[in-house]
Amino acid sequence: MAFEAGELTTLLDGRWAHVRDQVREALEGIDLAPADDLDTESHRAHTLEQLRQLAKTGVPALGFPTAHGGSGDTGGSVVSLEMLPGNLSLMVKSGVQWGLFGGAVVALGTERHHERYLRDIISLELPGCFAMTETGHGSDVQNLRTTATYDPESQEFVVHTPHEAARKEYIGNAARDGRMAVVFAQLITGGESHGVHALLVPIRDQDGDPLPGVEITDCGRKAGLNGVDNGRIVFDQVRVPREALLNRYGDVAPDGTYSSPIASKGKRFFTMLGTLIRGRVSVAGTAGSAAKLALEIALRYGDARRQFGRPGTEDEVVVLDYLAHQRKLLPALAKSFALHFAQEELVSSLHDGSDDERAQRELESRAAGLKAITTWHATSTIQTCREACGGAGYLAENQLAQLKADTDVFTTFEGDNTVLLQLVAKGLLTNYKDQFDDLGTLGMAKFLADQFVGSVIERTATRSLVQRIIDASGKDDILDRGWQLKMFDDRERHVLDGLGRRLRKSNRSNAFEVFNSAQDHVLRAGRVHVDRLVLEAFVAAIERCRDRRTAALLNKVCDLYVLSTIEEDRGWFLEHERISPRRSKAIIEAVNGLCAQLRPHAVDLVAAFNLPRQWLTAPIATGAEADRQQAQQAHDRTLRS
Amino acid sequence: MAFEAGELTTLLDGRWAHVRDQVREALEGIDLAPADDLDTESHRAHTLEQLRQLAKTGVPALGFPTAHGGSGDTGGSVVSLEMLPGNLSLMVKSGVQWGLFGGAVVALGTERHHERYLRDIISLELPGCFAMTETGHGSDVQNLRTTATYDPESQEFVVHTPHEAARKEYIGNAARDGRMAVVFAQLITGGESHGVHALLVPIRDQDGDPLPGVEITDCGRKAGLNGVDNGRIVFDQVRVPREALLNRYGDVAPDGTYSSPIASKGKRFFTMLGTLIRGRVSVAGTAGSAAKLALEIALRYGDARRQFGRPGTEDEVVVLDYLAHQRKLLPALAKSFALHFAQEELVSSLHDGSDDERAQRELESRAAGLKAITTWHATSTIQTCREACGGAGYLAENQLAQLKADTDVFTTFEGDNTVLLQLVAKGLLTNYKDQFDDLGTLGMAKFLADQFVGSVIERTATRSLVQRIIDASGKDDILDRGWQLKMFDDRERHVLDGLGRRLRKSNRSNAFEVFNSAQDHVLRAGRVHVDRLVLEAFVAAIERCRDRRTAALLNKVCDLYVLSTIEEDRGWFLEHERISPRRSKAIIEAVNGLCAQLRPHAVDLVAAFNLPRQWLTAPIATGAEADRQQAQQAHDRTLRS
């Protein structure tokens, strides 16, 4: 089962192959190695310097409008961040500067802001912050407590933090480098609140000192990402001019009159939020890359490392030949492939955009769901890789420690995964929306329930391919793709139907209790929905593969993804009599069999992702272990002869 | 359902309550706070200084013989390490100095070594290392490649590292502080190898410089535990006197004649290893404590933190009131109780010792199994706690980052968990030993198979209580303890029977393949065996509880432990038709119900462990969040009025 590694990389590089190549080349010229054993201040300085170098490569300009020095390539900007898994402090600081801060100015601002700030943002002349989260409100950002009160006399907004829970919290670039912040606050004019809006607020002068009324404290040391200077910001009646309001979705006239193209306060807020999902998509992409890098390290080491003699021989067994070791790493590798293709579909949808509101809601839902599933995948995969490398995996030089520490927050920032999956589920439950109008507050955008009225299973291009495969399938065989697709489909429908039935029992007085007692069911709904989307993306990608042998190998990888997913959730499939006990055991055996079949290709498969080689520095993954094994074997032979 | 917190703490403190109190008191007088944001060298210096302070408290002397300044309290010494979860660099460095290094001198040395070294070891005058692991051999320590060749002319041993894979690796205390090492090496005399033995080898002079022939390098930065100076040691024909051999289980006469009270090389080696299990037991205990500390932080925060408005009210919901949040934390809390009682039983067996070889093997198996299950529990629980605290959980000040980073290596040091569970399984499979004689090399002590011929389910004191409960049970109810015990029992028997049948098919030529293809089955056998032991320990502890209401609450905690364990493994129970689909769903609902019932007691339950208060410093767990919520509510009221 040989395959074309080049063909596979081409397929994986996909639509943004040119951007991936651009980053690979750009990185060859500069040293962006992560910091090693620096105190926090030095690590931050080091990362800022690297950010400056990155700015010079032109890569950060990808996502900005061409009129202001950018390339207008939204998808490319997301993909470029995916290429930085080896230095996640740098990636996150890039994300803060160009994705969140710059992205908010682009998406929520208007020409006056673009003209004035974008070039300086791209060049890093103007380092900035994205000040949304508050100490008291992280997931529920609709209820932020910072206020921006319009004063018609001076034609200024007064930005204010009313109490400690309202201070801006975990704000990247705030503790050290940021000069300006996009501050999200309740906009008040004429005594009336119009909901959360964003304003540009200068926070430091040219010397780097906080401006009057701005109190900045340091979040201090974190589990990881210590090259990023997270801080807290408290505003004491800070005044900014009327023009500081990023006024694309809501504006205040000099006399204080409020106007907006969107009448509903809730809809307006979620529309604003919706324009900012690029950050969420980037986190998913980078989490996926970090998992791939970890897998490459663990697989290369597992392919060289030997432990315990093999009975009847003088050799020791290569650890990746153990079933237990394969089971740790290969299903995770298969899932990495699946998520990679799903991510590319997501980036494409984001890039192409749509005027259709339903399509936009669906994009937001996919971004939320894929972010949750991919970041959890990264956390568990990197953990598993660390353990699979034993003590060597614990040493900083072998990279897994940093990957783990840096990605750990991905599951809760840019949207807490548990909240995001509920948002996904809610989007799917619009059929039942009349029954639970009052549940919008449970971390799930009520707006979505009001607006997104679609069938549960949407009909996309991919979907028609999937339907063809399902229709063509006559075989009731666990390796039959039609059967597999049907299993994922059916599970999603059943979970949603059941959830709908449960939630219909709610009314005004018991809404919280009914919803809360079904919360595990809600989370399951979100999860199985994403599982289906991911599988369909994988199937569509194999369909695009032009090389027969490569496609054959990918089909095995896809089988492993499907069957290990079913195995993990076989409690549900058995409980709902979707598979028999006998079939359940057969699935476990099939996963073992697929692990054995893919084991010889494991290193080639992970290498096909072709992450920039600069990021692979772990001695255990770059020959040290193989060299030692050779030296030991040579010595053993001398002793025997 | 009120309960007696004091009664519960008494039960939890158990047999070593006096030691727990001794440590609680000792810690009140000294500052052992972990380092914050120090570079590696400063962190190590800081930890060494704390180790010196700890030495002065007398606590480290607990485990040493009374004749040499100790208290002769083996169990107490293990429990005392459990009390240091707030500074795990300190705990591990203590474990290296007094547990591994000192423990090896006690267990493998004889009077001449005790007399000469123990007082200096206890006082930290002589900082030492435990140099077993090599770069090339971590799990398979029987095949270490360092040699100690006896030279009868000079009556010395020549200790030598033949190639890079044989260098000593990850050795605690080696990079900076250690003066002497217990070095494990293949003992060769008269041209014949007698297997691995331990020798005392000086590695540094009084000035801290490496001695001639000793090359020490630094393992550098690690994911955590950076207060511990791990290093690599290479020996170039280093000579030590004949008396340096720790000669309890094997000695070399001046003329080079080898003698040992144990004839079999394998048995001798595993007997030596067996005396060293205290380290493994300590790791399990400390991992358990770390999980409790993490849970205390997350539960206290979850009990104060609010997010998202509650429909129909002006309040926001306390996050621990969400089912999803309860499900993250409460089953883990229940398991922490279960493991706590199992750990105490293990420590008791270790402390009491036994001349019976079978009891010794069983103790080793329990230590291996409990170490694996508890350290994995710690890793997943601390991860979950971090996520449950969101961004706050990522900040160093809230302790979870450090707990996570420091405990991460616990799953692979002092025995890799995957290897340990196989060892457990093998101990249980002695009924089948004739069928797979040749499999000893697979990370599983062949010796155990040869020696430990017992029934699969041993009959201990606890066991008779369990049998009484099972016999008395007439109810086929998921909340009936007899039914629960039967489920765990039956699962273990079935898994072992099936595994035995599979392995009987092996012969000399296919041994590796047969064993390897069943490796997931082997791991499951180890796991379900430990699950049963843990449940039985929990049941026995409730039996000891003198307060009726406390016992009633503990029974609920035990129900949650049992049912969440079955829920997690319901794939197996359904696959083997041990539970019906309907019952499986009922179990999920019962877990939800138990979470709701235990939620009001969650903080009191975790507080009952009464870890030294010095270790609870996280602002989110010590009032900061509650204060903010109060201030916000007061402000909200002002706005409304």
Image (spheres, coloured by chain):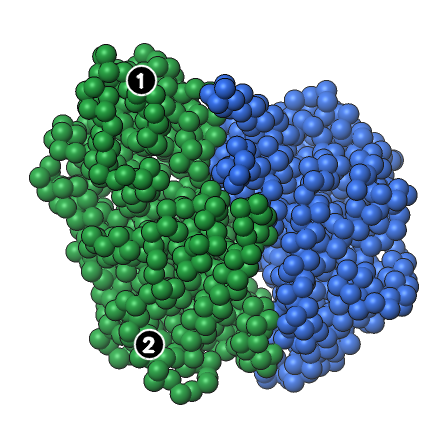
Chain colours: A blue, B green
> Looking at the image, is B202 positioned above or below residue A429?
above
Q: Is residue B467 above or below residue A616?
A: below
Within 10 Å of disc 1 (Cα), the crowding (few <14, some 14-19, many 20+) is many
Towards the viewer: A396 or B86: A396
Question: In the picture shown, does residue A260 fall above or below A511?
Answer: above
Residue A453 location, x and y as percent? 82, 72
Element marked by disc 2 = helix
Name the chain letter of the residue that bears numbered label 2: B
Relative side of A519 to B562, left or right = right
Quarter of the image for residue B109 reads top left
Residue for badge 1? B158
Per the image, the residue denoted by label 2 is B467
Q: Amino acid at mark 1?
A: Val
Answer with mark 2 or mark 1, whichever residue precedes in sequence. Answer: 1
Can you say whether B115 is above or below B542 in the image? above
Question: Can you say which quadrant of the picture contains the N terminus of chain A?
Answer: top right
Q: Looking at the picture, which amino acid does disc 2 mark? A: Gln
Please determine if labels 2 and 1 lie on a single subunit: yes
Q: Position of residue B500 (x, y in %)?
A: 49, 61
